[in-house]
Image (spheres, grey):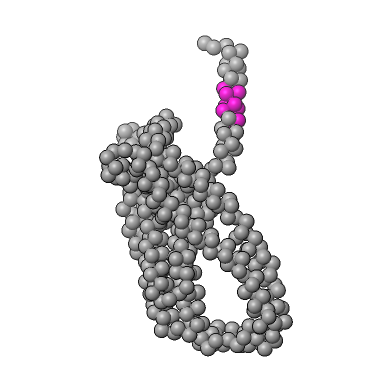
Amino acid sequence: MPSDASRSLDITRIVLFVLVLGILLVGSLWTLLPFLSGIIWATTLAVATWPMLIRVQQLTWGRRGPAVAIMILCVLVMFIVPFVLAIGAVVDAANRSPAVLGDFLTHGLGPPPQWVVNVPMFGRRIAAQWQVIAAGGPDALVAALQPYAGSAAAWALAATGGVGSTLLLMLLTIVLLAILYARGETAADGAVAFARRLGGETAERTMRLAGQAVRSVALGVVLTAFVQALLAGAGLWFCGVPHPALLTAAAFILGIAQIGPLPVLLPSVAWLYWTGDTGWATTLFLWSLPVAALDNVVRPILIRRGVQLPLLLIIAGVIGGLISFGVVGLFIGPVLLAATYTLAVDWVARGRAQEASEL
């Protein structure tokens, strides 16, 4: 039987071991913190597109290198190029806004167009205030815009200042994604082995279910956003709205962010009414309604096909993750809820099995 001195020594050794292990884990996470967003995005993209990589590898006679190159090119076209185009549009708008504002301040606002008066509920009030500002000339316009000048300046600085960090994150994501494509099986086997060592069969099943949840959300969210952006872009091009490619890229990003294409389509409709193209404006408005409602039908179907989890759980994970963690939360939220759901179901099942064996 161990003595009190040996038990005290064992406790001291265990406490020191846990302390050193905690320091190593915290230090490792702190070291990887600048790369954490890139690692999460690269892992998400790799898990979501892995079946496509295997298919491309089969088409390239089983060679991984050409398959990785093709997949990286596809990711650049599908994800990076729309982001770059949208960022360019934002920066261009931020750079041109002082000139546009200066023109307004020089010539005044002008009388309100007729379609403003016809806006239900608020049209007459908006037109009356517009008329007051227009009658006051440039000075009245300056007084009306002055409360919003600080917010506009902050927005312009944020639009131009965040471009460098965003491009750096994209570059890091692409590099890490290429590495994961090349060595994905090794990384997956290591993750599954770690999960099994940590929690046995339940943890391994949770790890696999998390991967399925990522792939399912990517299929539902990204594909739905891509289809909506294409349909929105087709409507913008057909109705003669300027810069349809940039607006399509913006619609795609808004679709990824679960906002939808309406913030792009409705201002385009208003612009067409403003310029007097009433017919095209009405056409684009009618086209926008089914395009905006498409995600309510297509997205749940695609998400439900990829993972055997309650649809409400996945949708709650998508929306809650987006609110809590930003865009990357689209994938973090469903993974967290899927893991929690799996562990809870397994815990309840083991309790019922134990009760049944005792009877």
Give percent across and percent down for residue 303: 35, 54
Q: Residue at x 57, y 17 (%)?
A: 10
Q: Disc count in the image?
A: 0
Q: Is residue 200 left or right of residue 147?
A: left
Q: Is residue 92 left or right of residue 242?
A: right
Could you tell me if residue 259 is visible in this image?
Answer: no
Give percent across and percent down for residue 133: 66, 84
Of 148 and 15, which appears nearest the observer? 148
Give percent across and percent down for residue 334: 43, 50
Could you tell me if residue 113 is visible in this image?
Answer: yes
Q: Residue at x 61, y 59 (%)?
A: 160
Q: Is residue 311 left or right of residue 330?
A: left
Task: Report the magenta residues as a range.
Answer: 14-23
Q: Residue at x 27, y 40 (%)?
A: 61
Quadrant of image for the C terminus: top left
Of 170 and 359, which appears nearest the observer? 170
Q: Main secondary structure of the magenta part?
A: helix
Q: Does residue 356 sit above or below 156 in this rendering?
A: above
Of 197 and 61, which appears nearest the observer? 61
Give percent across and percent down for residue 257: 48, 59
Q: Residue at x 63, y 88 (%)?
A: 131
Tell whether position 268 is magenta. Answer: no
Q: Does residue 229 sit above or below 120 in this rendering?
A: above
